[in-house]
Amino acid sequence: MIGTHLYGRRMYETMVYWETAHTLPESSPVELDYAEVWQSAEKIIYSTTMDQVSSARTWIERDFDPDSIRQLTQSAARDLSVGGAELAAQAIKAGLVDEYHLFLNPVLVGGGAAALPDNIRLDLELVDEHRFPNGVVHLHYRIAATQSVSS
């Protein structure tokens, strides 16, 4: 279970929906469960422009500091997740990401930020995959045991 989410500003603005999702009468049991999980996690927002947050257990950091994330990871009782293409690229290049959860959706949309950073190679091991009835496929990879990050 995720104990801390690391988000860029835009990803946080998308995910903050879960702070109040439990108040919507049409929320399904699955949505209510996820809202509870999201609300219970810490959230660190990396932004140079955001002045305030609109969710509990959330704070803003102006700069992404890989060493402070390493320290946080070592002292954390639960996993950390990274959300947002630019922030994820920084974390991947710093060697902070050891697992990847990719969700492939049966929709093509062009444009936007790249999901992975340039000039990096990582050998991955497939841990699990799951196909959902709606056509979404979840792929869970971890960095191969002999792998180190090289950029």
Image (cartoon, rainbow, N blue to C red):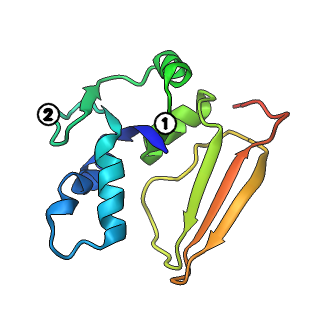
Which amino acid does the dot numbered 2 rest on? Answer: Gln
Q: Position of residue 108 (x, y in %)?
A: 50, 76
Q: Which residue is mark 2?
A: 52
Residue for point 20% across, 38% down? 56
Q: Earlier in the sequence, mark 1 or mark 2?
A: 2
Q: Quadrant of residue 24?
A: bottom left
Residue for point 58% across, 58% down? 102
In terms of depth relative to the viewer, which is nearer, 133 or 119? 133
Query: Rounded to the nearest whole Å, what is the CA distance between mark 1 and mark 2?
Result: 22 Å
Q: How many C-alpha atoms fall within 10 Å of the one at disc 1: few (<14), some, or many (≥20)? A: some
Up/down of 21 relative to 94, above or below: below
Q: Secondary structure at mark 1?
A: strand
Residue for point 28% across, 32% down? 47
In the image: residue 99, left or right of residue 45: right
Q: Nearer the viewer, mark 1 or mark 2?
A: 1
Residue 80's disc is: 1
